[in-house]
Image: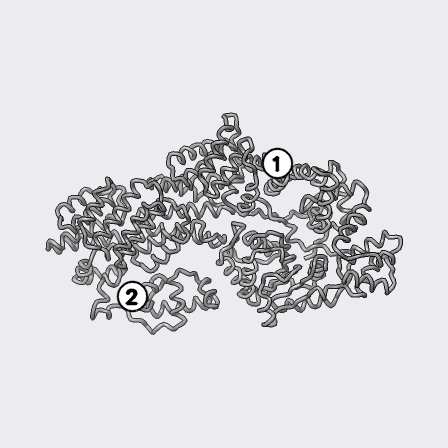
Amino acid sequence: MKNPAEPASTRRPVHRTVAPSGDPMLAVRFTVPSVPKRLVDRPALLERMTAGVRGPLTLVNGPAGAGKTVLAAQWVTEGLAPPATVWLTVEPGDAPGAFWAYVLEAFHRHGVRLPPEVGRPTRAEGVNQSLLVRLADALAESPEPVVLVLDQVDVARAPEIAEGLHFVLRHAGDGLRLVLTGRTDWLLPLHRYRAADEITEIRNADLRFTDTDAEALLSEHRLEISEAGIRLLVERTKGWAAGLRLCALAMQSSADPEVFVREFAADRTTIADYLLTEVLDTQPPRTQDLLLRASITDRINPELADVLTGRDDADQTLAGLARANAFLEQVDELAWYRLHPLFAEVLRAHLRQRAPGLEPLLRGRAARWFARTGRLTDAVAQAAAAGDWQFAAGRLVDCMAIGRLFTGLETEQLGRTFAAMPTDLTGAAPALVEAACRLADQDLPGCAAGLGRADQYLTDAAGPAARLSRAFVGVLAGRLAHDLAATEQAAADAERLLHEIPPPLLGQHPEIRAMVLAGLGAVELDAGRLDRAESGLTAAVEGCGQPGMEDPLCDSLGSLAMVELLRGRLRQAEEHARRSLAVAERSAHPPERRAGLDHLVLAGVAAEHDDLTTARTHLDLATMAAGPHPEPAAAVEAAVIGSRLSTAEGDWEGALATLHGVGSPAGPSQLSAWTVDELAIAESCAHLAHGDAGAALDVLDAVVSDRPEHAVARARALLAAGRSEHAMKVLAELPAEGPVTTTSRAQACLLQAQAAAEAGSTEEALLCLREALAFARSEELRRVFVESGPWVGRLLRQNPQLAQAHGWLPAHVLGYLRAGACEQLPLVVEPLSRRETEVLRMAAQLLSTKEIAAELYLSANTVKTHLKSIYRKLSVTRRSEAVHRARDLGVL
């Protein structure tokens, strides 16, 4: 795990991982820092490190410069750490998603293999609990413990990071050991580890240099100080390693080291003065100039340093400073260097004093260098810090990266950066970026104003990247406004302009085309253009095959699932919705990001399957994740499904209130013709459940519609009103082929069967019932038979062979639960145990095997064993069958 320097000619290609945003992950963060050449050997501390990793947690805690990182790095590079040791340097401001993305990459780069199903985060601000569960499970099954060293962990301020680490550590068992270095006690519940005697703590008192350590350090610097002088130095520095090293360096150039010891004061101001006078000022003027200019960036390499100085001597100068341990260290094999943070801070302050106004100019140069080398995020950050908003916005637009304001790990970071951008800038790029930022905040008026300003500059002479960015934002704005015409126009412009973008550049940003297709497909879905919506959304899904495309993939799959649900293709709808949820879980997608639509589709599927408990669960999840501006189709279908469930629960007034609420100020301001018809059909069903056929007909007659669903609903109301002949005429006009859903055909056959049964034509009724069953069987449309009324059960009980052929129907429709007929249910082999009942109850809540294991503190294999026993006892072969059987038997 050492990092020896290699000649440039013999270096092997370095593994470079591209983050979902498109930027490379910083290799320096996975590199064990080099230990100082003048190193004081501290065997007792190294032995405590080795003993510490026999338990779950080792904490190395002390102030800045106490030697925490040096101790941990020495322990690793000298081969004292276990073979499976992983290093990650934590950076200030790491958000939970970015932190866990780097942790997973650190495992990969240090040779720890994790199953692909563990997944990776795709957004900086958060991770899904499911990812942490999968990670803990994978580590628990590793053949040997993995030691994860998190250097300067306390700079991560998000409580979610500490909570996640605690969860993974506790649930990984013996598969994970944590070594944390930091200045302060971090957010982990350390008292629990102390109470369980599961922590090794190396504190500042342990890290402080003793007289012997200080003597060894001074000897390394070829300094001979009296014992009294050493004691005084240790006392005044309180054994602070960095302070002692600073003193040793200063004493080398001091005329009288003993006098220096007596006059040295160890307060921070004195150390800052020392850094300027005794370190910076002792360097040649050209080196001083390089250090001051290099301090504007967190990391520097020779090429960038040459750009900042205007010279070509940075390579030799930086290497010399690193060799001299002059508060500059080489951080990876690609010749990147990092100044000591305290030194860099002092240098920046001194730069502002020595050369006012120079810092923005230097940041501007750095921004352009980062842009040329493909580091877009760094380029934008430097340009923004320099106040060069034209360049910052221009790079985002010209590089076709405006989609990063809506998706990717850097979305929040870029949003915060551009939030400070003035609103009175000229040019298309600032206006487009402002419009996109406003749209990301769902500020449609602000977005429209930004687009209006951008249009003033976007003449035919404007480049295709700017015009495509305008069309891209226009599609997303049209979608949020539910404006079909505007969305279609913007999508057509985008499709034309896509052909003008160089393929390599377009290939770097596949999210542009995918999000355009997804946006147009969603608006066409709202308009009821299901065929066109399906075509565009399918193309969007196919275009989301690259890493980092989880956002548009989940978006497209959710909308496509809704299209299939509306068409009555329940299997395809459920498949798309569950795939979307699976992608979201693997990528730590937050539940509110499009998961609402997935759960809404699953609620509709469960309702059609007559699984009302599951339908209600999914509908509640969909409602919680809907957000303040749900799309019209989703809002209407949520109301329709909610009304259906309320009707099934006997809450007729609640069903009507749910439907009427869609037209309130809280609902969509504009509804398409098909959504209005959907609400009318649902309201008619609620009236029929209440026995008011007249009201059902009135609400349907108030809507002009040629949809087959409307005709079937009207026939049902007519039949309930006693107008059987008229109802049959309406059904006879249904097209034999064409856009009639499976659900509507099954309903039509059931209405014909009901009319025949009421007329005494039993054979015709049976014939129509058989047709209805044949239509419904492939999608297991159970609820339509329940809502048809008790006559279905009576007819099936009179024809037991037909009932036996369709055992997928609900038990109360087949008549199994009527008095004296329970014996027709397959016998339970033996009662379920308490633990099996708990497992089955969680399975009914749609938890995965690993999630059930985490909830019950069991292993995944134990849960699988319980499920197999449940299947045997209930005489079923699948989880869904077990849930249905248990509910029929009253077990759940």
- State which mark lies toward you, 2 or 1: 1
Determine the residue positioned at 20% across, 69% down. 819
Where in the figure is residue 387, as x and y percent of width and height?
A: 62, 38
Determine the residue positioned at 56% across, 41% down. 418
Q: Which mark is residue 334?
A: none
Where in the figure is residue 489, as x and y percent of width and height?
A: 41, 32
Quadrant containing the C terminus is bottom left
Q: Mark 2 points at which residue?
A: 888
Where in the figure is residue 60, as x and y percent of width and height?
A: 67, 63
From the viewer's side, name the closer residue of 622 and 247: 247
Residue 498 visible? The answer is no
Amino acid type at image mark 2:
Asp
**Callout 1 environment at 10 Å: few (<14), some (14 to 19), or many (20+)?**
many
C-alpha distance separating marks 2 and 1: 68 Å
Amino acid type at image mark 1:
Asp
**Callout 2 environment at 10 Å: few (<14), some (14 to 19), or many (20+)?**
some
Q: Name the residue under label 1.
A: 388
Circle 1: element type: loop
Name the colour scheme: one colour
Residue 291 visible? The answer is yes
* Residue located farthest toward the right when viewing the structure as drawn: 255
Quadrant containing the N terminus is bottom right
